[in-house]
Amino acid sequence: MAAEHELIDELKSYVGFTEADEVELAALQGPASSHLEELLDRFYSAIQEHAGARAVFRDPAVQLPRQRRTLSDWILTILAGPYDARYAARRIAIGKAHVRNRMPQRYMLTSMNLVRQWFVELCVSQYRAEPERLTRSIHAVNRILDIELAMMLGTYRDDLLERMQR
């Protein structure tokens, strides 16, 4: 866990993620739960529209419902924290699952964009009348999603290095 602790601390420092961001993310938990089905529908609709993304699922009838629950849990834990070594370890495990299931990196990245858009829309719907709070919440979302991306991309890099060494 020492490596995960160092990684999460480094990433939080690099993007400027602070306790104030944790407060902003925690405040989005209720609204996110209320609007989560909208994100899930949008997310899986995008997969269905793209043959390459659909091909990642070898048994869609089994995998998609399970993946839907996994995505839901992932979204809610993004907002809940704590943002520590255990959080980093869980995120690295998600990245390794993407690699193990041969999810092309481009779909992981572009899926993150769908998630980011939804979060920004959620922030706007919650804080439209409070411009400073809106800005803080969007910055918090961007910081944590960039941390998530960095950890997931690291798993793809580690896999590539391992395959090159073999």
Image: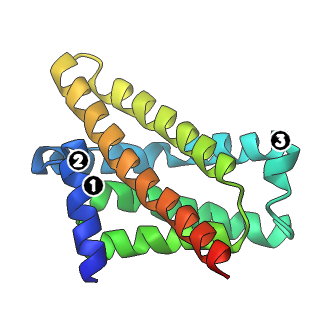
The residue located at (40%, 47%) in the rendering is 145
Q: Nearer the viewer, residue 135 or 162?
A: 162
- List the single residue furthest toward the front: 165
Q: Can the viewer see residue 160 in this picture?
A: yes
Q: Secondary structure at mark 2?
A: helix
Q: In this rendering, would 143 be left or right of 106?
A: left
Residue 109: image quadrant is: top right
Where residue 96 appears, x then y in whole percent? Answer: 56, 72
Q: Secondary structure at mark 3?
A: loop
Q: Is residue 161 left or right of residue 120?
A: right
Look at label 1 and name its amino acid. Answer: Leu
- Earlier in the chain: of badge 1 and badge 3, it is 1
Classed neighbour count for the residue bearing mark 2: other residues with Cα under 10 Å, few (<14), some (14–19), many (≥20): few
Left/right placement of residue 59 relative to residue 119 reads right
Which mark is nearer the camera, 1 or 3?
1
Q: Where is mark 2, residue-wise?
A: 14
Relative depth, front residue between 78 and 105: 105
- Residues at circles 2 and 1 in contact by the CB criterion of under 8 Å: yes
The residue under the point 27% across, 33% down is 139
| Identity, as a three-letter code, of the amino acid under mark 3 | His
User: Which is in the foreground here, disc 2 or disc 3?
Assistant: 2
- Cα gap from disc 2 to disc 3, whole angstroms: 34 Å
Q: Is residue 4 above or below residue 28?
A: below
